Amino acid sequence: MTSKKTAHPHETDALTLNGVEFTHRDIHTVVDLFYSRVQTDPLLSVPFMSVHDWPDHVKRLTHFWWIRFGGTPYMMSQYNPVEKHFFAGFNSELLAHWLKLFHATLKEKLSEDQYEIWALATLRMGHALAAKNEMYKQEYERATEARSGGESSDTNSRKSYNC
Ligand code: HEM
């Protein structure tokens, strides 16, 4: 039986984002080098201890950026960044450091045009992630408080929701 899944792109297959071309190899090269640096980075290696299969992480993140930039999906992959980042301890200090390391990697491996467009994409996503992380945190804290409040002060914990 043959699979109908879209074939994995060749290294030289390319997409164009705002007039700037990226090959699949460009994306993979950046992602691979960035995460090899993350693994030895004093600050970022800590939240990334949750990653046990680095080759798989690199594959998933290469695919993430490929489709994010308009490429055709070629693997079954669902992303849930807000929840994952929240539980990884995402905060503004880690984000600033992530961006610095990512941008340095882009600068080293890509052309100036490619650098600019990808760096801008990460800045926008970084802002969006920070905002969503804050909302997730507030909801999480509310839910935790409601649970512990209900358990400790009143067995009929619904009361607190109904007022
Ligand atoms: C603009 C900045 C960032 C972008 C675009 C980004 C993007 C992503 C994406 C798409 C994933 C995959 C999510 C999934 O599998 O559902 C991921 C995973 C992850 N990110 Fe980020 N990230 C950023 C910053 C950070 C920062 C600052 C941290 C530090 C806490 C971080 C820690 C992680 C970890 C630990 C995972 C792996 C979670 C796991 O699979 O166990 N990321 N990131």
Image (cartoon, rainbow, N blue to C red):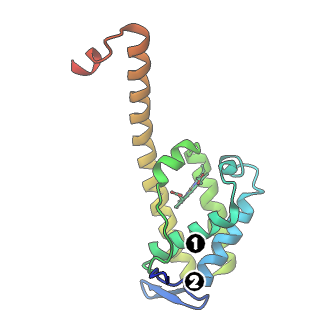
Is residue 64 visible from the viewing direction of this image? yes
> On screen, 156 above or below 71?
above
Residue drawn at 63 percent across, 81 percent down: 110
**In which quadrant of this rendering is ligand 1 seen?**
bottom right
**Circle 1 residue:** 62
Residue closer to the observer: 130 or 158 = 158
Query: Hey, what amino acid is under mark 2?
Result: His
x then y, percent, for residue 28:
63, 77
x then y, percent, for residue 161:
27, 21
Which residue is situated farthest in the front direction here?
A: 1
x then y, percent, for residue 118:
52, 73
- Compared across the picture, whether 15 is left or right of 24 comes to left
> On screen, 157 above or below 25?
above
Query: Hey, what amino acid is under mark 1?
Result: Thr
The secondary element bearing badge 2 is classed as: helix
Neighbor class of circle 2 (other Cα within 10 Å; few <14, some 14-19, many 20+) is: many
Earlier in the chain: of badge 1 and badge 2, it is 2
Q: Quadrant of residue 12?
A: bottom right
Residue drawn at 59 percent across, 78 percent down: 27
Q: Are marks 1 and 2 in contact (CB under 8 Å)?
A: yes
If the image is split into quadrants, where does the C terminus sit? top left
**Circle 2 residue:** 24
Residue closer to the observer: 18 or 13 = 13
As measured in the structure, the alpha-carbon distance from the residue carrying label 1 to the one carrying label 2 is 8 Å
